[in-house]
Amino acid sequence: MSPRLSSLTAVIGSLLFLATTGVHGTNITCLPEYAWMNNGLGQNPCDIATAAQNACGGGDWNTGPLPPPAEAAGYFYPGPNSYSRSTCMCSTVLYSLFSACGVCQNGTYTTWTGWISNCSTVVISIRSFPAPIPSNTSFPAWAYLSVTDNNNFDVQAAEAEEYLPEFTPVPTSTSDLTSTSTSTVTLTITPISSAAVSKKSSDAGVIAGAVVGGFAAAALLAGLALFFFIAIAGRSGARFARFRPRAQQHSRHASNL
């Protein structure tokens, strides 16, 4: 599939729902120079983000990869939509993790305000995670950095916190554990291209222009029709006025007889 077709497909379906068994982790490989993003378990930010999403329930998550590094420029992970939004997704922690997931594949990331654009009905967590950290992962310290000051994930600031202690799950006794079904709904978050988003906006402008032009043409035709109707009606009235006096004159002659 060509990169352009792949981009359009991603825009149409940024979130795909697949009925299947539970999925854990990802098949995403980060570039070696971003190994500092990994946690103490050797998980890359894509694996960590995928595990973090599961903390708010709604099924198991799977994160789709960006195109190969040579083609990944301009691709990023969009924020949650009406199907995927949750208190976990609408947090700075997951925004930072998904931003890092895009960067480590030679892609990019969206802004913080862009990420939470569909979170108006959900509590937004700033520099905190609204659920217990899943037992199968740990969060790097840089995931809790502020992103509201400059409205973006800061790669340099994140790397500076590489060796700070990680945030780990709170130990839970075995008596608190409950069994769950292995058959769940898997939700896949798919990266999109900034070029495709721009093209979509451009196409919307063309469509809007065509609609406005159509209304203008319809109004012009209606005006012409009204003009011809008035002109024809005026000529008909004039002919009727010429014949009517003669009819009255004929009536007077008849009465005199």
Image (tube, rainbow, N blue to C red):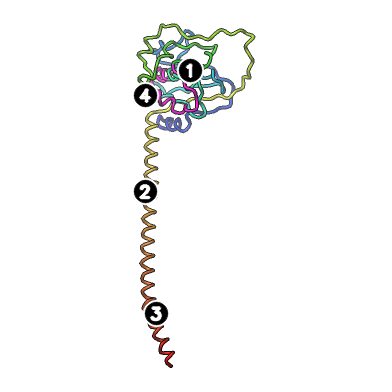
Q: Which residue is mark 4?
A: 73
Residue type of the residue flagged with mark 2:
Gly
Disc 2 from disc 1: Cα separation: 47 Å
CB atoms at circles 1 and 3 under 8 Å apart? no
Q: Where 244 sits versus 64, above or below?
A: below
- Indicate whether 199 appears above or below 148: below
The amino acid type, in three-letter code, at marker 4 is Ala
CA distance for labels 1 and 4: 21 Å
Foreground: disc 3 or disc 2: 3
Q: Which residue is mark 3?
A: 244
- Looking at the image, the residue that sits furthest to the bottom is 257
**Residue located beneath label 1 in the image:** 49
The local secondary structure at tag 1 comes to: helix
Work out whether residue 255 or residue 192 is closer to the camera in this orientation and state it: 255
Q: Earlier in the sequence, mark 1 or mark 4?
A: 1
What range of the chain is rendered magenta?
A: 99-126
Tell me which residue sits at (52%, 28%) in the image. 83
List the residue tagged with mark 2: 213
120 is within the stretch colored magenta = yes
- Check residue 188 in the rendering and tell me which mark sits there, or answer none: none
**Rendered-image quadrant of the C terminus:** bottom left
Label 4 element class: loop
Disc 2 and disc 1 in contact, CB within 8 angstroms: no
Q: Amino acid at mark 3?
A: Arg
Q: Nearer the viewer, mark 2 or mark 4?
A: 2
Q: Which mark sits nearer the N-terminus, 3 or 2?
A: 2
